[in-house]
Image: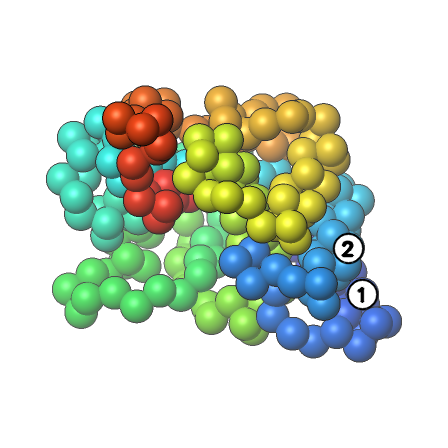
Amino acid sequence: MSQPYYLQSRLFFERSRIRFYDEVKFNKLSKNNLPFSKTAIDALFETKSISFYSYSISTKSDFYLKSFDKNPWLAYEQIALKLLGAALSDHEIIVLIADYVTTPKKIRFEVEVKKKFNSSNGRLALAGVCRFDSRSNDLLQLTDLLIGAITYDIKFNKGLVSGSKYKIELVDYLKNKLGTDSFLKGFKNYNFNVFVDKTDHLGSLKTEGGNVETNEKGLSS
């Protein structure tokens, strides 16, 4: 989005209006935070010039195993570069704010992403990269809700999760906003581009009893 200030200000206003100051995360959805989570999604759709890109891939997929050799940090970096490339407009300079995750000392995510992205574009396209604790940033929390909802819908459709009442309610709320009935095959419109890798085989791994034999945490975004 060209002016993230407007969305951040709206979220701050909505928090103040109902005196809700807890962090919202998709995996911690409950009766208490579901209403604000929906309000945050409403605020996103009412904000002009937004663009949302996501990439969902299973750690068991052919592409993941072939491209990243089970190295999650390489995957983290390369998928970030892929999404930045999709989001960049001509002559635009962008800044990447990412959720903070603990990494080994040898991982220089901020340095490598900026260097490689600017090198591949032959110009200054990425001014900087900074990881924040999501508890301090409403925009990161909103992103977590969106990615969590997309991932949960895929897992639910593949039988990897049994279905949580509040999570399913937020998933359905987002899908209704977008006018889609599933994220299983991805989704794309003018503002949203949800890419889902199709080489995971999770839907075809059956035991003799017919149950899906997979790790619930196998799919990530």
Left or right of residue 118: residue 163: right
* Disc 1 and disc 2 in contact, CB within 8 angstroms: yes
Left or right of residue 83: residue 40: right
**Residue 58, percent from left and from top:** 32, 37
**Residue 60, percent from left and from top:** 25, 36
Q: Quadrant of the C terminus?
A: top left
Left or right of residue 70: residue 206: right
Q: Secondary structure at mark 1?
A: helix
Residue 116 visible in the current orientation: no
Q: Residue at x 74, y 35 (%)?
A: 177
**Residue 108, percent from left and from top:** 23, 61
Residue 129 visible in the current orientation: yes
Vertical order, 158 against 68 (above or below): above
> Badge 2: few (under 14), some or many (20 or more) residues near its Cα, within 10 Å?
some
- Label 1, on which residue? 14
Q: Quadrant of the N terminus?
A: top right
Residue type indicated by callout 2: Thr
Report the label total. 2
For residue 68, which quarter of the picture? top left
Residue type indicated by callout 1: Glu
Vertical order, 47 against 60 (above or below): below
For residue 206, which quarter of the picture? top left
